[in-house]
Amino acid sequence: MGKLIIIYGTENKLINENLEKITNKLKNSEIVEINYNDNMPEIINAISMPSLFNESKLVIIKNTLFLSGSKSLDEKYLEMFNTIKDNKINVVMTLEKETIDKRKKITKLADKIIECNLGSVNVNQWVRDYVNSQNKQIDNDAINDLVYLIGKDLNSLQNELDKLILFYENNITKEEINKLVPKRTEETIWDLINAIYDNDKGTIFDLVNGLLDQKEDPIMIYTTIANGFRFILQVYLLQEQNKPQTEIASILGAHPFRVKKAMEHSRRYNEETIREVLHDLYKLDVSVKSGELDKEIALKNWLINV
């Protein structure tokens, strides 16, 4: 018995993954792929002719614009889609748009509708499933670190995972991610805040010079440091109210991993010290923006004296 499946969304990678799952499941089917482009006669011909040599037939219709907007299919075409169930013809329609009109008659005929927008995806679970599909394992801490460092772009995540899978024979851990995955500027700033607390001038200037070598603006560097300390202060004050990590993340609208980092730092600093650092960074910013000090020299002088 044939089925009509609709796949839509802005995440092309997810659309292709779902298509692959369907084609793998129907591997004994004759597969016909058509781009819509108002080419309804070809589509109707494909869905009305059962396969001559295979058990069933799979017709993939891409860029089905009639699923969205004001354009609709004629009644005569709609009627043809009712015949697929009896003819053992499976039809998959795809559309790379965020929404479709679920009030349309064609969508009401669908046996299954699959949304492929990022908001519909559990990114952590996607990472786990991808790693498992490559016969490897990855723990929760490693997933959290990876998503925090890379973000939620699935293409970028897969690129980093492919490197990790190729490089490491064993299961992927947090330590391996920290060795191989490049750190975002914000993550480097957390290391810098640690070095400031330890008064480790060597590490401080290694990190800052690394950022400057990457053409990061000194103003952006000290602003990100200030934002880091400001976030630590917010977390510190909420911890003083006995708020748990999950609630703090919800109140601040922050990634749980970022809150976890700030909680670790808040144990090392007291409120007075944090406020002093923020006051000094405010004075530094005024000096730079008034033209009194060169921004790179001002940043390095502050780090020497902090």
Image: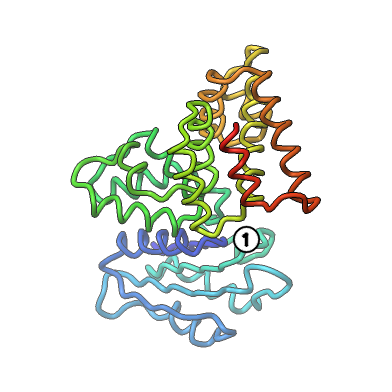
Q: As drawn, is 174 to the left or to the right of 276?
A: left
Q: Residue at x 46, y 80 (%)?
A: 34
Where does residue 1 sit, x and y in percent of width and height?
A: 38, 62
Q: As drawn, is 279 to the left or to the right of 77?
A: right
- Residue 53 found in image quarter: bottom left
* The one of 85 and 297 positioned closer to us in this rendering: 297
- Residue 86 found in image quarter: bottom left
Where does residue 93 sit, x and y in percent of width and height?
A: 51, 69
Where does residue 162 sit, x and y in percent of width and height?
A: 31, 56
Q: How many marks?
A: 1
Relative to 47, is 21 above or below?
A: above
* The one of 213 and 106 positioned closer to us in this rendering: 213
For the C terminus, the image quarter is top right
Q: As drawn, is 164 to the left or to the right of 144?
A: left
Disc 1 packing (10 Å; few <14; some 14–19; many ≥20): some
Q: How is the image coloured?
A: rainbow
Residue 113 visible at all: no
Q: Residue at x 27, y 66 (%)?
A: 27
- Residue named by callout 1: 98
Q: Residue at x 55, y 74 (%)?
A: 63
Relative to 256, is 148 above or below?
A: below
Q: Amino acid at mark 1?
A: Glu
Where does residue 51 sit, x and y in percent of width and height?
A: 32, 77
Residue 59 visible at all: yes
* The one of 135 and 265 positioned closer to us in this rendering: 265
Q: Residue furthest left?
A: 169
Q: Secondary structure at mark 1?
A: loop
